[in-house]
Image (tube, grey):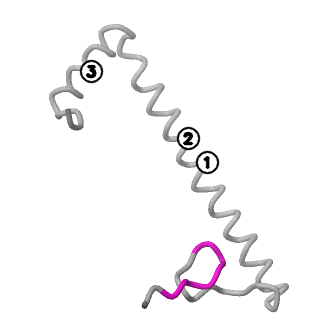
Amino acid sequence: MGALAPWHWAVLILVIVIVFGGSLLPRLGRFFGKSVTGLKQGLKESSEEFKTAVKQHPDSVKLDTTGSSSGEPPKNTDT
């Protein structure tokens, strides 16, 4: 049992349109469009705030150039 095939999605959308009517899809589209727009705006604002904070306090920011996301130094796996 894998992912749904494209014809599964087509049948599902057809059932949704029949049950809820054609006005549901445009409303859902607007809702998700506004959500994505809000998310992009929030990410942009937080990025700008971060850049401003780095410019104000450049010594307090330490970049991790090891590729580790945990902040800990990488473990030596050569044995």
Amino acid type at image mark 1: Gly
Q: Are marks 3 and 1 in contact (CB under 8 Å)?
A: no
Residue ranking furthest to the top: 19
Closer to the camera, 50 or 45? Answer: 50
Question: Mark 3 or mark 1: which comes first in sequence?
Answer: 3
Residue 29: x percent and y percent? 44, 33
As helix, strand or loop, the secondary structure at mark 3 comes to helix
* Residue in front for this viewpoint, 66 or 29: 66
Real-space Cα separation, disc 3 to disc 2, in angstroms = 24 Å
Q: Local crowd at mark 1 within 10 Å, few (<14), some, or many (≥20)?
A: few
Disc number for residue 34: 2
Q: Which residues are magenta?
A: 69-76
Q: CA distance from mark 2 to mark 1?
A: 6 Å
Please report the residue visible at 21 percent of the width from the left and 37 percent of the height from the top. 2
Main secondary structure found in the magenta portion = loop
Residue at position x 27%, y 21% in the image: 12
Q: Secondary structure at mark 1?
A: helix
The mark found on residue 12 in the picture is: 3
Other residues around mark 3 within 10 Å, as few (<14) / some (14–19) / many (≥20): few
Mark 3 and mark 1: span between their CA atoms? 28 Å
Going from the N terminus, do you reach mark 3 or mark 2 first? 3
Q: Residue at x 22, y 33 (%)?
A: 4
Q: Position of residue 63 (x, y in %)?
A: 66, 86
Residue type marked 3: Leu
Residue 67 at x, y = what percent?
52, 82
Taking the magenta stretch, the answer to whether it contains residue 4 is no
The residue pinned by badge 1 equals 38
Q: Quadrant of residue 21?
A: top left
Query: Are discs 2 and 1 less than 8 Å apart at CB?
Result: yes
